[in-house]
Image (cartoon, grey):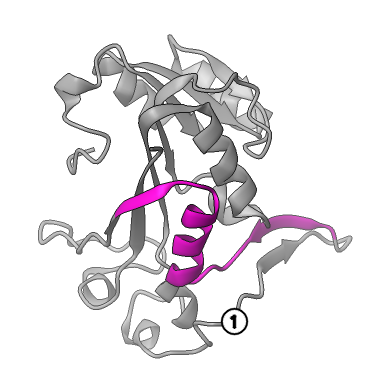
Amino acid sequence: MEAELLGPPEDLKGKDVLEIGAGAAQCSRWLAAQGARPVALDISHRQLQHALRIGSAFPLVCADAGALPFADASFDLACSAYGALPFVADPVLVLSEVRRVLRPGGRFVFSVTHPIRWAFADEPGPEGLSVSASYFDRTPYVEQDDDGRAVYVEHHRTLGDRVRDVVAAGLRLVDLVEPEWPAWNTSEWGGWSPLRGNLIPGTAIFVCVRD
């Protein structure tokens, strides 16, 4: 939000914005506060129930990002913060759907965990600074329940894969942002820490436009 990759806050007023993989719709609430007209979409009914409990004065839509239930050219902007794209086997399908519902000149900004993360142990200390796997290993990360059913699947794509996906969907990549660890952040979260964050990027943000 501070990076203004969707545009300056004053330019968001009155814009139709689709948030994909919205979860509890935190981004949509911020967008609404800027005067935008967001729609929060997620495949998880439970996540949207959280959004409803927190409070939302905008539409909440339960649907698959690979089959968006909107007419062509319905939105000025679209965004996704770690939502949908890491969890689908065919990201080009999702990106193509986003392009379809964007108006000409519309912008799509999405973030994913930086692909380099897959090569390192997910630890905040020195042990998280050693390469433990191949960056090029595209085997999905899968968690299973006691009956062997997949309950969580995350797909690994390299940076090059992500760029090619964007182009294959007919979008134009205008920026790829790799935020640096902020000096004020001295806390640890999960596998991340100032030690690790100052050496390895944690996030990749893709800024795309529909011409």
Q: Secondary structure at mark 1?
A: loop
Residue at 50% x, 37% y is: 99
Image position of 15 (left or right of 160): left
How many discs mark residues in the rendered view?
A: 1
The image position of residue 100, as x and y in percent, is 55, 32
Residue at 17% x, 58% y is: 185
Q: Residue furthest left?
A: 183
Q: Which residue is mark 1?
A: 137
- Relative to 206, is 129 above or below? below
Residue 193 visible in the current orientation? yes
User: Is 13 included in the stretch rendered in magenta?
Assistant: no
| Dot 1 crowding, Cα within 10 Å, few <14, some 14–19, many 20+ | few
Image position of 149 (left or right of 207): right
The image position of residue 38, as x and y in percent, is 41, 19
The image position of residue 71, as x and y in percent, is 59, 19
Image position of 201 (left or right of 16): left
Rendering quarter of residue 148? bottom right
User: Is 171 included in the stretch rendered in magenta?
Assistant: yes
- Range covered by the magenta-colored residues: 149-174
Instruction: Give, as a three-letter code, the residue at label 1.
Output: Asp
Rendering quarter of residue 187? bottom left
- Residue toward you, 106 or 12: 106
- Residue toward you, 161 or 79: 161
Residue at 78% x, 58% y is: 150
- Residue toward you, 141 or 4: 4
Q: Quadrant of the C terminus?
A: top left
The image position of residue 183, as x and y in percent, is 10, 61
Residue at 61% x, 75% y is: 138
Rendering quarter of residue 21? top right
